[in-house]
Amino acid sequence: MKFQKAPLQNGIRVYSICEIARERMSAYYPRMAHRLVAHRINHIDRGISQPTAYGKRMERLSNRIFGEVVKPTDVKSKKVVRVMAAEPLETKEQLSVEYYPNLPMFHYLTKMLRFHGLFFDDHVVFRQVQDELKILRGKVVRPPIGQGKRAQLRAKK
């Protein structure tokens, strides 16, 4: 029993392992060559990845060992498992109280650096210039509590 010629790939005839083994076996065992070789070679690579009973059991066992979903499930169930297995939001370092910077301390440090001339903040300089211009126009920049515009209006009445 001769097999068909394989197609050319880059000018070279390429045969599969089954075809080569079948051809060699047919010389010695003409009747059984196609059955024996095809069966052994086709099923030699079947293992964990193939849908055999053994492969399914091995996949379930590996899923159980590594803490994954044991049986195949849909996407929604996998999402529920992933959410429940995740670390709680309260214990995450990024969301804890210690994660956020100490703003009053940084404000004081930048104020001291600005006072010593080591830090220059354009916005603070702009606010100072605006305050000076308001004072030159006769306005009160930041009056003490109880002495603002509303307090003066009440005093007139």
Image: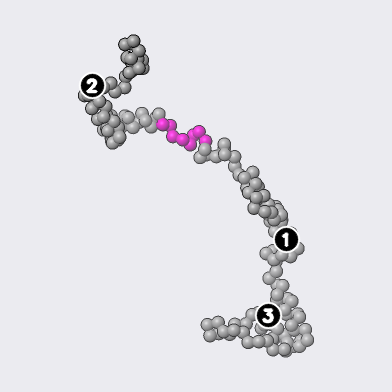
Question: Could you tell me if the residues under marks 2 and 3 are in contact, i.e. CB atoms within 8 Å?
Answer: no
Determine which residue is flagged by label 3. 18
Tag 3: amino acid: Cys
Question: Could you tell me if the residues under marks 1 and 3 are in contact, i.e. CB atoms within 8 Å?
Answer: no
Cα distance between the residues tagged 1 and 3: 26 Å
Question: Which label number is shown at residue 138?
Answer: 2
Comparing 131 with 30, the one in front is 131
**Mark before the other along the chain sequence, 2 or 3:** 3
- Judging from the image, what secondary structure is the residue with disc 1 in? helix
Q: Is residue 133 above or below residue 80?
A: above
At label 3, counting other C-alpha atoms closer than 10 Å, the crowd grade (few under 14, some 14-19, many 20 or more) is some
At label 2, counting other C-alpha atoms closer than 10 Å, the crowd grade (few under 14, some 14-19, many 20 or more) is few
Residue positioned 50% across, 33% down in the render:
97
Would you say residue 142 sits in the magenta stretch? no
Q: Residues in magenta?
A: 96-103
Q: As drawn, is 106 to the left or to the right of 21?
A: left
